[in-house]
Image: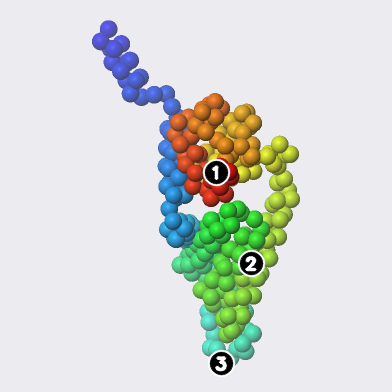
């Protein structure tokens, strides 16, 4: 009998849940809390945090890729500059920038990803949306900074930075438009574009189906109340985050006051 009670107690303290699922749920909870906290910060604070975190991720990727390039080929030696014309030296610097070791690639990728994410964050806050123009501006900044840091190109640093920035911007713009073309949402989803963006920013994209079930389209966002969200089975915590975000959004708040 005593062993049976002990078994029941152990079962209570050790729920039958996959440890991986527990870790994923915990990570999702932390991510949601972090995004909600970040959305409440001032623009300089948010941009600085996004830039640093993205740069750290880029540095990790660059270091890994630099390790692979080190294994594939030895570092490119630099011959005496007197023996090379400016065009040859420019080509050599480009090759060194693209085939450097872990530290070089970590630096290059950190600059590209950090600057891109930081500018994207600022553009999104200022313009209230993510589009091809914002994407190209961010790509231009990251390309220009990559050119300056890596030393690619000839002696004219300013011209090379502008050229690299334009190249990055054109590539990014083309990829953005291509992605838009092949990922057109269904007609129904066009009525939930702002809703999807709002929920994604808060880490609550799983509740998009609740909005669709209650026909809470983008047009209803300024009119949302706690009872309306409760009617579509959204829990209290996410309801508070959604209403707080709407209250802080200048565009939605303005429509709400009319």
In the rendered structure, find residue 98 and report the number of the disc placed on it: none
- Label 1, secondary structure: give it: helix
Residue 95 location, quadrant: bottom right
Q: Is residue 214 visible?
A: yes
In the rendered structure, find residue 82 and report the number of the disc placed on it: 3
Crowdedness of circle 3 by 10 Å Cα count: few (<14), some, many (20+)? Answer: few
Quadrant, the N terminus: top left
- Mark 1 or 3, nearer chain start: 3
Q: Nearer the viewer, mark 1 or mark 3?
A: 1
**Marks 2/3: CA distance?**
32 Å
Q: Residue 65 location in percent, x, y?
A: 53, 61
- Mark 2 or 1, nearer chain start: 2
**Marks 2/1: CA distance?**
42 Å
**Marks 1/3: CA distance?**
70 Å
Residue at the extreme front: 258
Crowdedness of circle 2 by 10 Å Cα count: few (<14), some, many (20+)? Answer: many
Q: Nearer the viewer, mark 2 or mark 1?
A: 1
- Label 2, secondary structure: give it: helix
- Confirm or deny contact between disc 1 and disc 3 (CB under 8 A): no
Q: Is residue 196 visible?
A: no
Q: Residue 70 location in percent, x, y?
A: 51, 66
Q: Residue 20 location in percent, x, y?
A: 45, 35
Residue designated by label 1: 257
Residue 139 location, quadrant: bottom right
Q: Residue at horizontal 58%, vertical 80%?
A: 158
Residue designated by label 2: 168
């Amino acid at each position: 009998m005593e062993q049976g009670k002990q078994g029941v107690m152990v079962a209570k303290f050790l729920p039958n849940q996959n440890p991986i699922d527990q870790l994923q749920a915990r990570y999702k909870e932390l991510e949601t809390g972090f995004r909600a906290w970040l959305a409440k910060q001032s623009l300089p604070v948010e941009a600085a945090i996004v830039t640093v975190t993205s740069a750290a991720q880029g540095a990790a990727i660059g270091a890994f890729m630099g390790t692979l390039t080190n294994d594939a080929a030895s570092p490119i030696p630099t011959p005496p500059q007197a023996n090379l014309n400016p065009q040859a030296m420019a080509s050599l610097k480009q090759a060194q920038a693209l085939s450097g070791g872990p530290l070089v690639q970590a630096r290059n990728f950190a600059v590209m990803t950090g600057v891109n994410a930081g500018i994207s964050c600022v553009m999104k806050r200022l313009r209230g949306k993510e589009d091809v123009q914002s994407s190209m501006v961010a790509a231009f900044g990251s390309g220009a900074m990559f050119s300056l840091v890596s030393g690619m190109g000839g002696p004219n640093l300013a011209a090379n930075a502008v050229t690299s920035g334009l190249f990055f911007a054109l590539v990014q713009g083309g990829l953005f438009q291509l992605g838009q073309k092949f990922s057109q949402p269904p007609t129904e989803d066009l009525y939930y574009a702002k809703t999807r963006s709002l929920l994604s920013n808060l880490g609550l994209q799983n509740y998009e189906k609740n909005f669709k079930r209650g026909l809470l389209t983008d047009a209803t966002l300024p009119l949302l109340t706690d009872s309306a969200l409760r009617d579509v089975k959204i829990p209290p915590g996410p309801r508070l985050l959604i209403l707080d975000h709407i209250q802080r959004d200048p565009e939605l708040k303005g429509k709400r006051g009319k």
